[in-house]
Image (cartoon, helix red, strand yellow):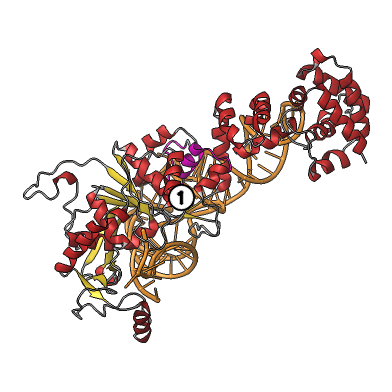
Amino acid sequence: MGGVGWGGGRGVAWGARGGAGNVEPVPSPVRVRFAPSPTGFLHVGSGHSALANWLFARHSGGEFLLRIEDTDAERDRPELIENVLEMLQWLGLQWDNDPPRQSQRRALYEDAAAKLLADGAVYPCDCTGEQVQARNKESGGKPGYDGFCRDRGLEPGPGRALRFRTPREGRTGWTDLVRGEVSFANSDIEDFVVVRGNGAPMFLLANCYDDADMGITHVIRGEDHVNSTPKYLLLGAALGLAAPEAFAHMPLLVNEGRKKLSKRRDDVSMADYRDRGYLPEAMVNYLALLGWGPADGVEVRPITEIVEQYRLEDVNAAPAFFDQKKLSFVNAEKIRALSTEEFIERATPFLTRGEPAVAALRSLAVEVQERVRTLVEVEPMIEFLVVDQPEVDEASWTKAIVKGKAVPEMVAATIARLEALGAEEWTPAPIEAAVRQAAVDAGIVNAEGEPQLSKAQGPVRVAISGRSVGPPLWESLAVLGRERTIDRLRTMQGQLP
RNA sequence: GCCCCCAUCGUCCAGCGGCCUAGGACGCCUGCCUUUCACGCAGGUAACACGGGUUCGAAUCCCGUUGGGGGUGCCA
């Protein structure tokens, strides 16, 4: 396999590079990198790749480095770098370096390009895309560069790109931790552009150069990079750089249509998930489960255990569907695993109604905590405690009032029974007893004369909260208070059909 | 078109030649618990794409077919 002859980097520390005759191989610690380009907000797919790098590094006691690949001045939005870093931080994927920016290392790439030119590894090309396309169409419609300028002996200059002189024979391959041995026939690889006509170095050059410069031992990235890997390898060899020990091309995350997740169609913004009340530990745990599973089958678990168990060799190569339903499940599990105090703390940023809402949550935290799947679901559950009069939603009204049994009787009886309670009796147990009595008063009973609470409580719940579902009723009434409860029941009484 | 990769329940993962009448998780359905909802508990639903080999024996190995994905930029 492989006709590249570029395996010198295997197991060799990068510190040894450059020194003449310095061939003492030193076992290399693992060094991986996540190299986002700031052309968009961090999305779940990049998060998946970043996580794989981080897990691999932490598992093996190596380093997780960051590098900003901002070589495309046209598309880069520098302000997005902050978003990417913020999201990684949010996810808890702490990096171990001060991330270099490729836009500030251009001179290095230019030197490398000059060396390639001097060696004849690249050649100037002045073909436009249209010209190449036209020639391809004429000669049979094969896409890709046809090598037109390969032997024209053009001098480098403005407007002339530098193309890599790809070998016509042999194969280029590598060991992929996820996919096994992968290789491409060199003849299938076109003479790709290394430096643009405007002199700007391209992704492959900067990427390959920096990986070597940073001493990256394992390149872990998405499957969409598989095809560019032989180019990376060929380029690196031409530059005399040592190759990474191995690559790992992670499965792509796909949507219901089994297409690569896209910013346009799919919910992919990491920040959006955060803002919709997903916990970072849930996101990380779920992302780890895409393409991989722990040997013992325990899916929802602390990140430390995932770090222990995670192995790239166990990662599946097939694309994985990003299932929001399962993400929600994991999120709910993580929420329930929180201490009550922590739950309150982490839900607080999602409360838009200020201190009263926080106080309301505090009073019903235990009940709310086991009922929400995301943090944004918290406020609707306690909102009735902070508004003057709850808004009744259509579905609840229909369910509890329109279709309810003996509603007017129940409301009236509840008011009467509740009013009979003394102020010191306004606690869950006496309230329950009172409502039970009210149900009996209203005739909402079963064959044995027992109150049918599931039916009886509907109107009461809607009256005080506007909704037919919510935290347990007795506790809710207790927190709402005697006055407000009776007041809302009276209001409802006036609105009954 | 060409190149590369992939192929077990709807979804995610387990299975790496016999322990598989294929296991777990999500989802969905049923029941129990129960003051709604949720939790919890007990069940159920549902898959080895197809065809050839190899082998005493294949979900597991090989080949082909089909299907899916990715790439095919002077983007990264």
Evaluate whether residue A497 shows in this view. yes
**A335 left or right of A208?**
right
Q: Is residue A21 above or below residue B51?
A: above
- Give the secondary structure at mark 1: loop
Residue A112 lies in what quarter of the image? bottom left
Residue A336 drawn above or below residue B56: above
- Provide residue A269's location: percent of width, then percent of height: 51, 50
Q: Is residue A403 visible?
A: no
- Looking at the rendering, in which quadrant would you find the N terminus of chain A? bottom left
Find residue A82 and report its horizontal and vertical position in percent: 43, 46
Note whether A364 is above or below B51 in the view shown.
Answer: above
Q: Position of residue A441 (x, y in %)?
A: 93, 24
Q: Determine whether, in the image, residue A388 is placed left or right of residue A153.
A: right
**Kind of residue at badge 1:** Leu
> Which chain does the numbered disc 1 sit on?
A
- Reading the image, the residue beneath label 1 is A42
Question: Can you give x and y, in whole percent of width and height, for residue B24 in the image?
Answer: 52, 38
Q: Nearer the viewer, residue A177 or B45?
A: A177
Q: Is residue A265 magenta?
A: no
Magenta stretch? A276-297
